[in-house]
Amino acid sequence: MMLRISNLREYETAYRKSVEEPENFWSEIAASFTWKKSWNKVVTWNFESPEVKWFEGGQLNITENCLDRHLSTHGDKTAIIWEPNNPSEKGRTLTYRELHEQVCMFSNVLLKNGAKKGDRICIYMPMVPEATIAMLACARIGAIHSVVFAGFSAQSLSDRIQDSDCSMVVTSDGAYRGAKEIPIKEVVDEALRVCPTVQRVIMLERTGANVRIDAERDRLWKEEMGKVDARHEAETMEAEDMLFILYTSGSTGKPKGVVHTCGGYMVYTAYTFQNVFQHRPEDIYWCTADVGWITGHSYIVYGPLLSGATTLMFEGIPTWPDAGRFWQTVDKHQVSVFYTAPTAIRALEAAGLDYVRPYTLNSLRVLGSVGEPINEEAWHWYHEHIGKGNCPIVDTWWQTETGGILISPLAGITPLKPSYATLPLPGIQPLLVDANGKEITGNGVEGNLCIRYPWPSILRTTYGNHERCRTNYFATYPGLYFTGDGCKRDEQGYYRITGRVDDVMNVSGHRIGTAEVEDAINQHPDVVESAVVGYPHAIKGQGIYAYVICTKEHENVDMLREEIKAVVNRVIGPIAKPDKIQIVTGLPKTRSGKIMRRILRKVAEGDVNNLGDTTTLLDPAVVDAIRDGAISG
Ligand code: PRX
C-alpha cells in the first residue's frame, strides 16, 4: 500500500514534505508500483517551454499495475460492476482475473488488426465494460487511446480523429441513453467519410441495431475476440511515453488534445484516488461520469483499478426510468463511495424527495462532487438527504489538464466547509495572482488560480501543437501553470473555485468554449455573426446564451431559433445547444472591433441596469437595442 494519509497531522506532514523534498516524496510513492525498470530522475521541468518529465528512465506498463499485479492477491475480487441503462436488463460483473483476460484478448485483437505501439486509436462507445477493456488494451500494447464522448456529433468526432491521425476506431452499433437509442455506428460511418487514416473499425454489438458493415474496414468485437489467445505480455513503455489524448475545449479555436503520459499519470491518479476517497478494500465505488471525460479516465478506470478497487460503471442517466435511479442503484449494489456532479444533484433535488425516500442509502460512507462549483444549497441537500448527515462530501477541484484531483478535502479528515474545495493535496502548490500576474498573498483574498510546481499528472503537451500548450497554460503568467479559474482563499486558507475567468463555459459540468458554439452557429446560412456567453442556470450551473445577427429579417423567429439549435446539435452535439437565442442587429464592439462580452454577460444574467462603462463602444446605441430585446427568465 502506498503512502496513506489517515489523519490531519499526517496530511500536514505529507504536504510539508511534498513541498520541501518533492523528489523524495514522489519517489517513495512511485516505488509502491510495479516498474519493469526503475527511473533515473524523479522530475525535470521548466514552465517556460514548457517541459515536464517525471520518472524519466523508468519503464512500466500501466495495465500490469491495473491488472496483473492484483491477480495473485485478489484475482477473484470484482473489478467492474456494470449497471445497464435499463434496470430490468441483467447487469454484469468482471473479476480482476476476467478483466485481465478480456484485456489480453482485446490487446491481441488490436495487434491482429494492425495496431502498433504509438498508434492513435479512437474509442467512441457507450458506458459498457468493453469501453474500459478497449482503453486498457490500447495501453497494454502501447497504443495511445483517444476516447471521444459518444454524445458528440460526427463532425466533432472526425475533427478529433483527424487531429491525431487515428488508425482505428473502436465503437458499438448503438447506445441506450434513458428512453433513447442512439445510432453510434451511423455517426462513426459519417465521420469516417473524411478520415482516410482510419483503416479499421471494431464494433461491439450492444443494441442489435441494423447497421451498415463495410466488409473491408469493419470487424465485429465478438468475432475478433473468438479468434485470439487469452495471453498477452504487456508492452514495455517509457514513463514519458504517451498514454492517452483527451480533447477538451479552450477559449479559442477547436478543442485541443491534452496529452498524458504513462508513469506520472499512474502514480498521481492512484495516490489521489486512495487518499481523497480514503479507499478501503471492501468499498463499492461509483463515479457517475462517462469514460469520455477525464473524470471517467482517472476515477472510473485508472485510479480505482490501480488501487484494486471495485468500480461501478453505469450506462444510464440519472432521471430514467425516474429520478430515483441513482439511489436505487446505490442500494442495489451497496455503494459505499458515490462521486457525481453538482448538476445531477441539483436536477435530482428539483425532482423531490419522493424519489429518495424509497431507498435506505445506508451503505454510503463518502460522497464526492466534481466538474463545477457546488452551490451551498445543493451541498446541504446532498449532505442531509443522501449522506444522512454522516458522509463527508469531497468537493474535488481539477481539470482535464491536471489529470487528477488537485484541491479537495480528504474524506473524513479535512474539516469541511460547504462549497469549498478546501486544501491542496500533497504535491500541489496553488497561488492566486492578480490581472498583472502579481501574487496575492495572505488570506481572505481572491484572484486567478495558478500552480507553481509540477505534479506527476500535469499535461505534457497539446497533441501536435506544443506552442498551443505553452500559450494556453504557461504564457499568461510566466513561470506558472494558469488554470483558467477564478478562486477565493478564505481566512483559514481554504480554496473556493468561483468558475472560469476565460471564454470557457461550464454547462452541466461539460466544458464548452464560446468560440466553438459561435463557429457552429455561424454555419447557419442566414447567420452573419454571433456571440455566445454563459449565464447562471438553476440546474445546469451555466446555460448558453447566444446573440445572433442574421442576413435578413425572419418572420418566424422561433423556427429560426430551432434551426440554429439544430445546426449546433449537428456540428457539436446536444450538450452545446444554446438555451436562449436573441436575434440582434448589432453586437457591442470596441473601436478596435473586439466584442465586449462583459456587457453581453450582464444582459444574459438579467443585470441590465448595471452594464458599466459603455463609452468606449463603437456604437453605444447597440446596447440599448440588446437590452430591450433581452430574453429573461
Ligand atoms: O472550472 C473548473 C471546473 O471544471 C473545469 C475543468 O473542466 P474539465 O477539464 O472538463 O474537467 C472536469 C472534471 C475534472 C475547471 O477549470 N471544475 C471542476 N471541478 C470543480 C470545478 N469548479 C469548481 N469546483 C470543482 N470541484
Image: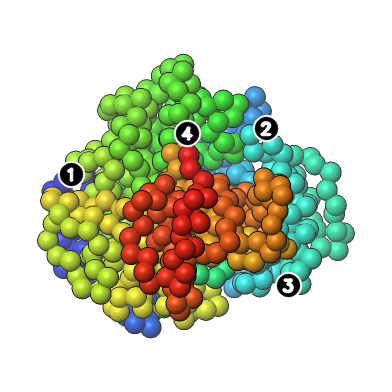
> What amino acid is labelled 3 in the image?
Thr
Q: Residue 593: percent from the left, percent from the top?
A: 49, 76
Q: Residue 592: percent from the left, percent from the top?
A: 45, 79
Separation (CA) of disc 4 from disc 3: 41 Å
* Residue at disc 3, secondary structure: loop
Disc number lying in front (3 or 2): 2
Residue 336's disc is none
The answer to whether mark 1 and mark 2 are in CB contact below 8 A is no
> What amino acid is labelled 4 in the image?
Ala
The answer to whether mark 4 and mark 3 are in CB contact below 8 A is no
**How would you rate the neighbour count of disc 1 (Cα within 10 Å): few for under 14, some for 14-19, many for 20 or more?**
few
Disc number lying in front (3 or 1): 3
Residue position for label 3: 197
Query: In terms of sequence position, does the residue under pointer 4 or pointer 1 come before the other?
Result: 1
Query: In terms of sequence position, does the residue under pointer 4 or pointer 3 come before the other?
Result: 3
The answer to whether mark 3 and mark 1 are in CB contact below 8 A is no
Residue 404 appears in the figure: no
**How would you rate the neighbour count of disc 3 (Cα within 10 Å): few for under 14, some for 14-19, many for 20 or more?**
some
Respond yes or no on whether mark 3 lies under 8 Å from ligand 1. Answer: no
Separation (CA) of disc 1 from disc 2: 45 Å
User: Is residue 233 toward the left or the right of residue 23 in the image?
Assistant: right
Residue at 77 percent across and 59 percent down: it is 190
Residue position for label 2: 179
Query: In terms of sequence position, does the residue under pointer 3 or pointer 2 come before the other?
Result: 2
Q: Residue 324: percent from the left, percent from the top?
A: 51, 25
User: Is residue 550 toward the left or the right of residue 542 in the image?
Assistant: right
Q: Residue 554: percent from the left, percent from the top?
A: 70, 53
Separation (CA) of disc 3 from disc 1: 52 Å
Residue position for label 1: 7
The answer to whether mark 4 and mark 1 are in CB contact below 8 A is no
> What amino acid is labelled 2 in the image?
Ala
